[in-house]
Amino acid sequence: MEEQKSVKELPACPVETTLTLIGDKWKVLILRDLLTGTKRFGELKKSIGSVSQKVLTAQLRDMEESGLIHRKVYAEVPPRVEYSLTELGLSLKPILDAMQNWGEEYKSSLEKAG
């Protein structure tokens, strides 16, 4: 596994650093799905929906490289691969909870206005 990014490679702004790591739509949805537990590639693809296999693979690799998820390969035929959140990945739960709460409040405000 490659090493995580060094501090020198990350933006000076902490908000920008967070966006660099999880600012992609698919990464946030991957985190959302892995918060409930370990998932296989097919489960993630089905749950996320319209993401292509190529893009999902690239996002998972990037998140593994950043230390947010753990990839476990079982020596079976066909190979079985499972993804789970690392402690660092789990530490993003309050951010995702806040995003969910904000989204619910926003949708509720639109319903009241409309």
Image: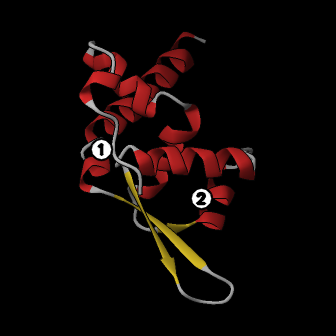
Do tag 1 and tag 2 residues touch (Cβ < 8 Å)? no
In the displayed structure image, the side of residue 51 where residue 88 appears, left or right = left
Q: Position of residue 13 (x, y in %)?
A: 27, 12
Q: Please state which amino acid type lies under the numbered disc 2.
A: Leu
> How far separated are the C-alphas under marks 1 and 2?
18 Å
Image height check: is 69 above or below 81?
Answer: above
Between disc 1 and disc 2, whose residue precedes?
2
Frontmost residue, 23 versus 99? 23
Query: Residue at the location (26% across, 38% down)?
Result: 94
Frontmost residue, 9 versus 14? 9
Q: Position of residue 97 (x, y in %)?
A: 33, 38
Image height check: is 20 above or below 50?
Answer: above
Tell me the tag on residue 44: 2
The 10 Å Cα crowd at callout 2, few under 14, some 14 to 19, many 20 or more, is: some
Q: Please state which amino acid type lies under the numbered disc 1.
A: Lys
Disc 1 is placed on an element classified as helix
Query: Residue at the location (31% across, 18% down)?
Result: 15
Residue highlighted by disc 1: 93
Query: Residue at the location (48% across, 54% down)?
Result: 33
Q: Position of residue 3 (x, y in %)?
A: 34, 47
Res 75 → quadrant: bottom right
Image height check: is 58 above or below 1?
Answer: above
- Can you say which quadrant of the picture contains the N terminus? bottom left
- Can you say which quadrant of the picture contains the C terminus? top right
Frontmost residue, 100 versus 83? 83
Query: Residue at the location (41% across, 51% down)?
Result: 2
Q: Position of residue 19 (x, y in %)?
A: 41, 24
